[in-house]
Amino acid sequence: MAVSSGLATASFTGPKLESPLLSSSSSSWTSPSQLPILFKSSSRHPRHRKLSSIQKGPRCEVLSASFFSSSLDVADVLENENGNARVKSSSISALEQLKTSAADRYTKERSSIVVIGLSIHTTPVEMREKLAIPEAEWPRAIAELCSLNHIEEAAVLSTCNRMEIYVVALSQHRGVKEVTEWMSKTSGIPVAELCEHRFLLYNKDATQHIFEVSAGLDSLVLGEGQILAQVKQVVKVGEGVVGFGRNISGLFKHAITVGKRVRTETNIAAGAVSVSSAAVELALMKLPETSHANARMLVIGAGKMGKLVIKHLVAKGCNKMVVVNRTEERVAAIREELKDVEMIYRPLTEMLNCAAEADVIFTSTASETPLFLKERVKDLPPVGPEVGGLRMFVDISVPRNVGSCVSDLQNACVYNVDDLKEVVAANREDRLRKAMEAQAIIAEESKQFEAWRDSLETVPTIKKLRAYAERIRVAELEKCLSKMGDDISKKARKAVDDLSRGMVNKLLHGPMQHLRCDGSDSRTLSETLANMHALNRMFSLETEISVLEQKIRAKVEQNQK
């Protein structure tokens, strides 16, 4: 599934919950029609699916005249020399109205699952390698993301083809702004440049996207199994990390279930199903067919990706190769597994000598600096005409192991992960048929996940109802104890306290039972949500300070310490 760029904007600006845009000035507008746009965001369509394009119009977040007329009826709205909006408050009541309006927005707004992503479909490899976060750094990244004012939960999916941040945002727009700024800070890429390439997906779209990713529908090679293993790793690393909360954890665990089910029921994993296998197919596609059996193969790196390259080479009939790795242990383990293959180990110090004797070189190391640059490759001896006369580098690493400058040489050709699209172009009809079957499964599973998430919506009502009942219990208990006098024994005091708790618990038992469901039955879920709204009305629970507002205030206070 190709994904287009998301909201293209240099930044978002706007008031926080307790911080409206206030400043003093002597000039003012006389007409609401002259109000500036505070949130600017031009967007191409957020995502174009492989099967059916889902078109979405541009987002333009504007503080409308109606907002100001209802919240700032006595305020002057001003514009400074940079065109930025400012508000001059001419009375305390206007400020209070703005605060109330902001709080009301949080009361009505439900926390959102948001994905801020940059993938091979929208972003060049040069940018992706700057954004890449090593697996060992995922817990730190989650902690930093969750320290942002409007981010409650987070997860990082960083692979050679994508860098995607999944969050539960207490406010969609503020959350996106904060995460984008965090990505800019950690990568050194300007916010404006990130916004040109990123895509943004919310709630149901975000759910469908991670399900498609896990199923391999968003991969260059349809159904590739490596991405499912990477999604599993997100859950494994996230277990025990504070910010990897119930919503995000549930989302990724459900995505794993979807990925397994799609592969089992559609056989989508048949054929070339990984970046490694696509790399081998690309190399063989470029080589003359008569040279397949005799081409000299060199694999640099014996990690997971390198091992897969070796296995796919063997599957294609290559039974002799040289493997360069830092240590011999991994190569020995692979050699033990593939006993009929002549596998020659060489240390990393002999890499250039091995490259001089190779026709095709696969690189898949974790090196953060290029292993091959123009000045190193230009002096290598030429390869024979039987393999096309060009030494082939197939680089499947991010960051890249082979500098792009190598492709300037007349005796070499370089392919990286972005070039694997050529392999994907084969057998398109069969892939689409399997993808259609997979989409039906994803649609079904998405409904189940959304139902589960809807069932969590009753949790704030349960908490509010318990708190409401507890306040009444404590107040009435104090009245009772004061009437009983100061000479009441501890035993009697405890008996009265236990009596009040028991009565409250028994009275709440029925309502609580009708507020709980797992989301598996749509009829039960609808009844549960109806019960929730009824209890909110009966006990005026909706007038309580919103859960979102409480969370944001707590986070702001924590960050200010």
Image: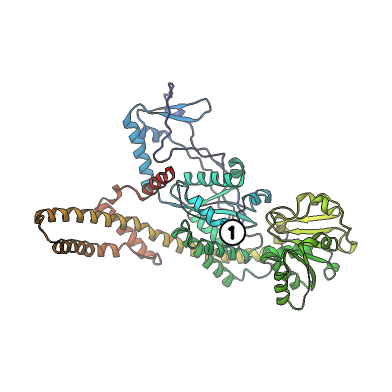
Indicate the position of residue 89 as horizontal and vertical percent values.
37, 28
Which image quadrant for residue 76?
top left
**Mark 1: few/some/many CA within 10 Å (<14, 14-19, 20+):** some
Image position of 155 (left or right of 291): left
Query: Which residue is located at x 59 percent, y 40 percent?
Result: 192
Residue 44 in view, yes or no: no
Which image quadrant for residue 260?
bottom right
Element assignment for label 1: helix
Residue receiving disc 1: 135
Query: Which residue is located at x 58 percent, y 58 percent?
Result: 136
For badge 1, the amino acid type reads: Glu
**Relative depth, front residue between 270 and 409:** 409
- Of the 4 image quadrants, the one containing the C terminus is top left
Indicate the position of residue 12 as horizontal and vertical percent values.
51, 39
Colour scheme shown = rainbow
Is residue 415 shown above or below 86?
below
Is residue 525 shown above or below 71?
below
**Relative depth, front residue between 294 and 28:** 294
Is residue 43 shown above or below 210?
above
Residue most extreme to the top? 26
